[in-house]
Amino acid sequence: MSRETKKEVLTTKEAAKRLEAGESSIRLWCSQGRFEGAIRVGRDWIIPESSLEGFVKRERGRPTMNFDNSSKRTDKGRKKNIKIQDKGSG
């Protein structure tokens, strides 16, 4: 009988490697409750492996606005035609 044991919990460092994120990000996400069942041990966390399934990292930077054609502004960037009257002699 083989003694194959499946690891059920990960350290902060292991979770960071698996999610391709920094350890400080993992600690922040744990404190925000984004990993269900994570337990704080000193500075680091013990994270259930199952809580990483389906985890999606948020994109960095400002969110982009996606508009469909019905809500897109059509006047953006257009120059308005302004007629300037000549103040010549009369």
Image: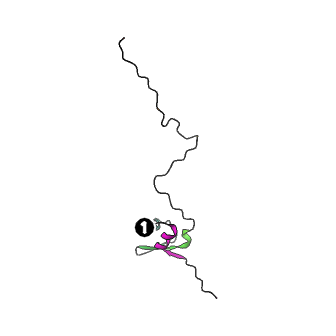
Percent of width and height locating residue 28? 44, 66
Hey, what amino acid is under mark 1? Ser
84 horizontally vs 53: left or right:
left
| Crowd band around label 1 with a 10 angstrom C-alpha radius: few (<14), some (14–19), many (20+) | few
Judge left or right: residue 86 versus residue 75: left
| 29 or 17, nearer to the observer | 17
User: Of helix, strand and loop, which one carries label 1?
Assistant: helix
Q: Where, quadrant-wise, is the C terminus in this rendering?
A: top left
Residue drawn at x 55%, y 77% is 8
The residue furthest right is: 1
Q: Looking at the image, which residue sits at the far left? A: 89
Q: Residue at x 50, y 75 (%)?
A: 10
Count how many numbered circles sit on residues in the image: 1
Q: Residue at x 35, y 12 (%)?
A: 89
Residue 89 in view of the camera? yes
- What range of the chain is rendered magenta? 1-23
Percent coordinates x, y for residue 85 in the rendering: 40, 19
74 part of magenta stretch: no
In this rendering, the answer to whether 70 lies above or below 61 is above
Q: Is residue 39 visible?
A: no
Extreme-top residue of the structure:
90
Q: Which residue is mark 1?
A: 24
Q: Residue furthest bottom?
A: 1
Can you tell which quarter of the image residue 23 is in?
A: bottom left
Residue 33 horizontal/vertical position (percent) = 48, 66
**On the rendered image, what quadrant is the N terminus found in?**
bottom right
Colour scheme: rainbow
